Image: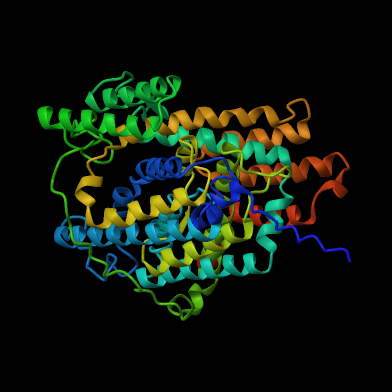
Amino acid sequence: MVSKSPKAVRRPDPAVDKRGPLDSWFEISRRRSTVSREVLGGLVTFFTMAYILALNPLMIGTVGDVSGNLLGGIPAGTPEAPNLEGLQESKAMVAAATALVAGVMSILMGVIGRFPIAMATGLGLNAVVAFTVASQFTWPEAMALVVWEGILIGLLVLTGFRQAVFRAVPPSLRAGIAVGIGLFICLIGLVDGGIVRAGSPLISFGVNGSLTGWPILVFVFGLLAVIVLNVLKVRGALLLSILAATVLAVIIEAVVGLGPFVPASDTDPGNPAGWMLNVPTFTGVFDVPNLGLIGQIDMLGPFLDPSLIMTAVLLVFALMLADFFDTMGTVVAVGAQGDLLDKKGNPPHLSSILVVDSLGAAAGGLGSVSSNTAYVESTAGVAEGARTGLASVVTGIAFLVAMFFAPLINMVPSEAATPVLLFVGFLMMSQITKISWDDIEDALPAFLTIVLMPFTYSITNGMGAGFITYVLLKVLRGKVRQVHPLLWVVSVAFVIYFLQGPLLSAFSA
């Protein structure tokens, strides 16, 4: 009788054994990262986008709606006699809700999307809501349109349409999108750092054409710190440069007392050498957030007046298209920066990323802070080493903490944080080698995408010009069959988007 040998026991891979549930879910080892890198990257992302906590209240917290009320139903007063107490209350509520929604959505993006992208109120989108939507609707109605936009984008994700459009984008345009966003965030850094300003005939350099003033010195110091620390391969270089520049800024403000930037006018010299966004002063540590704006929406209100129904539909379409393609551009840029895209240029967990992004639009409306979207400043965290959604969780936690420690967060001036954006813009330029510059069908759409993003201050405008030009060139060269059917749909949608001004005027008339 032959004895059977015992069944071989399959031994687990020691490398797998070492991975805990945190590592497995976020794929930290698989993406060749570490927890410490993710934490550093998440904090860098937070500090480079924390300006939204100061800027969003100024953008939507100080504008009266069609009925003359601020957010929260607070009377705005008149230009001659503004309601100053009401303005302060409105801005405080917007700041608290902005931090809350950004925190929750960034954490969801990290846990569900598992991608190093943080979320917050989208700049540009909030301007449209404040100065276009709220001029024709009440604030609860305007924010309801933002919720409807999020719902529609969510439906496009669930039907697979949004993912299909993402995958239909040709490689040359993907590269152009990444480079264009690199230049765009570089321009954001230069503007918020006070290096590029409005001037005559269009823009100017520094203060009256020179690098004058202490805040610009802080910016230059921060930029040199980023460069030196990176060349020396110091871990946490981006975050360390932000903290060092902030310390310098606080010292300078305590000694000199510059105050905020005020543009000069014919009757007032202003304060052109002041701090651009946040004045780096110590005003305390703790503050109790006012979350009174949460849920102040009127979902049916925008559609009750027959004369405004078509206007409401067009505004939702414009918001949806901008949100739709802003996210696409940001995902491509972040994925390219972190080498996270597959051979076809698609990121991992694409459907999950887009689901969370659509939730962000609706959550922004529910929080009365405008649509939340993926933030291109996430590339700063990726440059610091972030590769997984754990970094987004860290950023989200930082936003939630910021609700209670707003005075400390406001100590970081834009001049200390924005040098990081210039360095990230430099890193993202490497994608330009993936464009076939000797082929006009690839090169011209990519070129228009690249230049129009920074020059029009809009990711969506650059992408729209690129899509339309790509389709047009294929038609002119008799290559209609090479155009993906979805690119026809997208191009027509962009034509409508670019004509939204005349269309709105026509329907309003």
Q: Quadrant of the N terminus?
A: bottom right
x, y percentage for residue 8?
Answer: 74, 57
Q: Residue at x 51, y 54 (%)?
A: 20
User: Which of the 4 quarters of the picture holds residue 276?
Assistant: top left
Drawn side of residue 17 relative to residue 421, left or right:
right
x, y percentage for residue 155?
Answer: 61, 70
Drawn side of residue 441 relative to residue 21, left or right:
right
- Between 435 and 378, the one lying in front of the other is 378
Q: Residue at x 78, y 29 (%)?
A: 439
x, y percentage for residue 348?
Answer: 63, 52
User: Which of the 4 quarters of the picture holds residue 143?
Assistant: bottom left
In this rendering, is residue 22 above or below 508?
above
- Between 188 and 390, the one lying in front of the other is 390
Colour setting? rainbow
Drawn side of residue 135 relative to residue 440, left or right:
left
User: Which of the 4 quarters of the picture holds residue 453?
Assistant: top right
Q: What is the residue that sits farthest to the front in this orientation?
A: 1
**Count of labels shown?**
0
Drawn side of residue 340 relative to residue 455, left or right:
right
Q: Residue at x 29, y 60 (%)?
A: 94
- Between 431 and 313, the one lying in front of the other is 431
x, y percentage for residue 252?
Answer: 16, 28
In this rendering, is residue 67 above or below 109?
below
State whether residue 193 appears in this view.
no
State whether residue 360 appears in this view.
yes
